Image (cartoon, grey):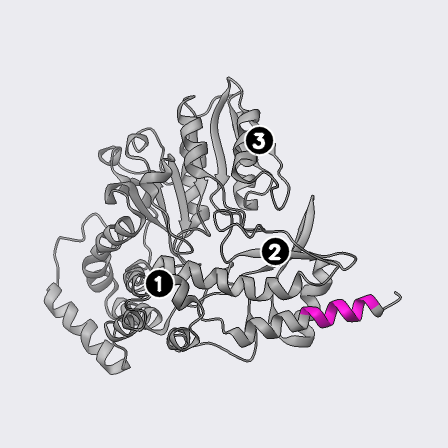
Amino acid sequence: MYPNYKEGAMVSRRELLHKVGTIGLASGISSVAIPAMIAGGAAGRTSAETASDEVYWREIQQAFTLDRTFINLNNGFASPSPRVVHEALKRYLDLSNEAPYTYMAQMLEPGIESVRRGIAAEADCDAEEIAITRNSSEALQIAQLGIDLKPGDEVIITNQDYGRMITTWEQRVRRDGIKLTKISFPVPVPGGHAELAARIEAAITPRTRVIHFCHITNLTGQIFPVQRIARMARARGIKTIVDGAHAFAHFPYSLRELECDYYGVSLHKWLLAPIGNGFLYVRRENIRSTWSLQPALPALDDNIRKFEEIGTHPAANHNAVAEALKFHQAIGCERRAARMRYLRARWQDRLEKLPTVKILTSRDPAQSCGLAMFTVAGIPAEKISRQLWDKHRIVAISIVHPEFEGIRVTPNIYTTLDEIDTFAEAVERIVRAESRDPA
């Protein structure tokens, strides 16, 4: 990316750090105080105990700068960053703008290595298997387009994979003559993980080369048994690509234990990093055989950094991820997951009492977390979404899939109980009003 960043430096790293610190003091933001305060508030208590502690979560909610005139339940798109993360982004951008080559390319860009190590530690994998990307789509497309496939080779996906990823495979069908097999599964899945694994296994043929699936789907929040599928695939010489866009920092897991070959993540969703951040995990043995999305020098053939060759780009985005990691770790992933399940149960308990409402997401904590979907018989999902916004200033998106439709609900750790209750009450009103409407 910046192959000459070590040459001809015009400022020392100490001088740069002094400038960063000065700007930080001027902004009144302490990158140490906020995470320390959050960690101290939960000391000695279990995740279940803190999940319903509104005093604790109120402290976290105040770490965000938000527009509270509406309720945002579409954090599955991208979440606001905490103030400390956003201020870090602005500091780095200000410095970069003073002298792009000197400050950004030479001094700030090497910070990507600290971010790489931080992500690897949190994900439990080798830092030399982590490439920093701009989002999960880019990460996954590196794998999808980088694996050598011949005409007639088969790829298995699900029809609930993210649309951009399906489009990418469909382009390979047109360009390379591969065969694409899409499996279907009900929502929620009656047979759970065993049924999901069995449906994929049943689609395998001697020509299958790749299995691509979500760790947790972006539609209903169904969690897949990644390790089980990865082991089944590896035993047959099949590569696995896992879409983890909604998984990292949403609920705890270890990449080593998942045992997949490729894993793509968006960091601007649940980690709360600045928009435009993601990472790709590539199992070390696959790095050489996987082509980079943009060409890299042959010297990088075995180097995970070959997947980061995108030309000039802001260092501020990825460097601010370091602050997002600290904020996340102060809370703890187990604690965050418990809170997300608590918030989901809060609205689900109310809405499932309505006779026309069906929850399309399993309550089993092994199969779901904070992302969930519901549908209302007789009322189009788009109509509900529109009324939530027009009448109640609530953002919750409608999703229409060929096999089902519903409202996806994705709160985050800054979401208050009052906001969850306001949402549930609004849905109740809409359902009652529609049931009285003869039209």
The mark total stands at 3
Name the residue carrying label 2.
373
| Element marked by disc 3 | helix
Please identify, in this view, whether the residue under mark 2 or under mark 1 is nearer the observer.
1
Residue lying at 63% horizontally and 69% vertically, measured from the top left: 424
Q: x and y percent of residue 187 in the render? A: 63, 45
Q: x and y percent of residue 147 in the render? A: 41, 30
Relative to 375, 271 lies left or right = left
Check disc 2 and give the amino acid type: Met
Name the residue carrying label 1.
46
Q: Quadrant of the C terminus?
A: bottom right
Lower sequence index among marks 2 and 1: 1
User: Can residue 11 be seen in this snapshot?
Assistant: no
Residue lying at 53% horizontally and 56% vertically, measured from the top left: 371
Q: Is residue 413 above or below residue 113?
A: below
Check disc 3 and give the amino acid type: Arg
Q: x and y percent of residue 243 in the render? A: 46, 44
Residue lying at 25% horizontally and 54% vertically, measured from the top left: 118
| Element marked by disc 1 | loop
**Mainly helix, strand or loop, the magenta region?**
helix
Lower sequence index among marks 2 and 3: 3
Relative to 19, 49 lies left or right = right
Relative to 77, 132 lies left or right = left
Q: Which residues are magenta?
A: 427-435
Q: Which mark is residue 137?
A: none
| Element marked by disc 2 | strand
Check disc 1 and give the amino acid type: Thr
Task: Inspect the magenta stretch and tell me whether residue 363 lies in it.
Answer: no
Name the residue carrying label 3.
199
Outermost residue toward the right in this view: 438
* Local crowd size for mark 1, using a 10 Å CA cut-off: few (<14), some (14–19), many (≥20): few
* Local crowd size for mark 3, using a 10 Å CA cut-off: few (<14), some (14–19), many (≥20): some
